[in-house]
Structures are given as C-alpha cells and as structure tokens.
Image (cartoon, rainbow, N blue to C red):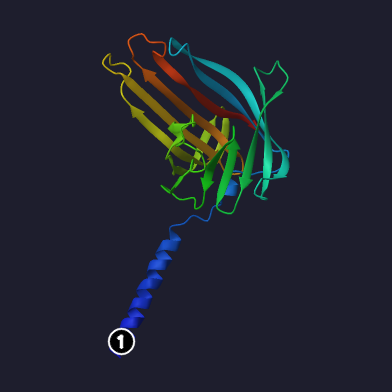
Amino acid sequence: MTKFITGTVLASLLLISCTKETQTYSTENIHDYFPLAVGKYITYQLDSTLFIHFGARDTVVSYQVKDVVDAQITDNLGRSGYRIIRYIRQDTSQAWQPNNTFEAVPTTNSIEYVENNLRFLKLEMPIRQDFSWKGNSYIDTYSVNSNVTYLDDWDYIYDSLDQPLTINGINFDKTLKVAERNDSVGDPNDPATVYAEKTFSEEKYASGVGLIYRDFLHWEYQNCGGCPDQGYSGYGVRLSIIDHN
C-alpha cells in the first residue's frame, strides 16, 4: 500500500512540474513577427555611420531602402526560402536602384537570414521573455581569415514583449525586442587608453509586419602614438520603418 501511495504522489508531482513548464511558453509564433510572402515590402530610413580616415571624424549618411520579397526559392540544403531584394535611393526625388540581395529561410523553430554571405538566426522559438539563443552560431568568427570576429558568441535575448510602439508616426500594437549585444572595452576619452572597442546591436519586430527597427554599431579605437592606424575604425547601421504593405 505504501509503495502505491508513494508512486501516486511522485506521478502527481511530475505531472504538476510538467504542467508548470508548459505554461511558461508563449503560444505566439516567430512567423507572426517575420511574415514572408512574395510582393511584401518594408521601406526604411537608413542612417549609416562611417569613420573617415581612421577616426579623424565620423559621419552619418542617410538613405531610403526598400526590402522586397522577390521570389520563393530553394536553398542549397533543399529547403524552401525567399529571396529579398533591397532597393536604395537618396530620397523621394530619385528612382529606386537595386542594392543588395538577401535570403530568408523560415523553419519550424527559427528564421534564418543570409546577409552578405553571413547566416544569422534572427528569431527562435519559443517567444518568451529572456529566452536566448546563439544567433551568430553559423558564422565563422574563429579562423585567421575571418574579418567578423566581433560577431563571436552573441546571445540573442527576447526583451520587451507585447509592447505597443510608434516609429516615424507609424503605430504598432504588438512588438518585441531582440537584444543582441552591448559590449565595450576601454575608454577612448582616456589619454592612457591604448585600445578600446564597442559593439551594440538590437532589433525590434512588429506582429504581422516584420523588422521595424535595427540599431547596430561596431567600432575599434587604437592609440598608437600617431601610427597610420591611429583613431577609430568601424561602422554603424540604423534602420527605422517608414512604410510597409
């Protein structure tokens, strides 16, 4: 009799534990925040930060870009995906010109996005506050030939779920933020600093729309007593939505 009671209690505890675990997961799907269909587009204000002559100064150059889902494709692993073409112009007085091509592969548990031959895991299941994943795990950040070592070991983390947000006068009822990196070393304002570095990256997505905001900045600073590489090098990109269908 005692063994039966003990077994029943243990089974009940396991059932309760499993029930609690299941309840912590959101019923939302990542595809709600990254909808893909041929003909869909999002137009952004793009502000590009450049460091001129290794940090003599930095400057921000602004454009408009439109990302258009151009066609459904099959990737090199035989999976269904989408080709996205980016068009660019200085302002509304100019015609759109093709600028870049991206690839998005929606799977059951992730959204893979290929940009400049780098494969990112933009979104992952489940959508849950503080859930994290290695978003740059497919990128070579280790080899001697890699020029993107600063992308190594990033933890993408869901933050600020289900938040209303207004960007450039466009209202979104339901958004989420993916905090990707916020890391710095050294202080370039300190004359004793020999090397400093900063990397920041976050993205925001709206349900039913897709990416509505991106802020990325990476720079390195060297203080080498007037050598050719003295100062800053790096770049930054800020995208903010201005139109979509």
Q: Residue 62, percent across and down? A: 57, 18
- Residue toward you, 122 or 134: 134
Label 1: element kind? helix
Give, as a three-letter code, the residue at label 1.
Answer: Lys
At a point 33% along the width and 79% down the height, the residue shown is: 9
Q: Residue 140, percent across and down? A: 50, 38
The C terminus: image quadrant: top right
Q: Is residue 85 above or below residue 160?
A: above
At a point 39% along the width and 33% down the height, the residue shown is: 182
Asked whether the viewer can see residue 245, the reply is: no
At a point 35% along the width and 73% down the height, the residue shown is: 13
Q: Residue 219, percent across and down? A: 43, 23
For this view, does 209 lie left or right of residue 193?
right
- Residue toward you, 10 or 225: 225
Q: Which class describes the residues within 10 Å of circle 1: few (<14), some (14-19), or many (20+)?
A: few
For this view, does 187 lie left or right of residue 121?
left
Asked whether the viewer can see residue 84, the reply is: yes
For this view, does 130 lie left or right of residue 140?
left
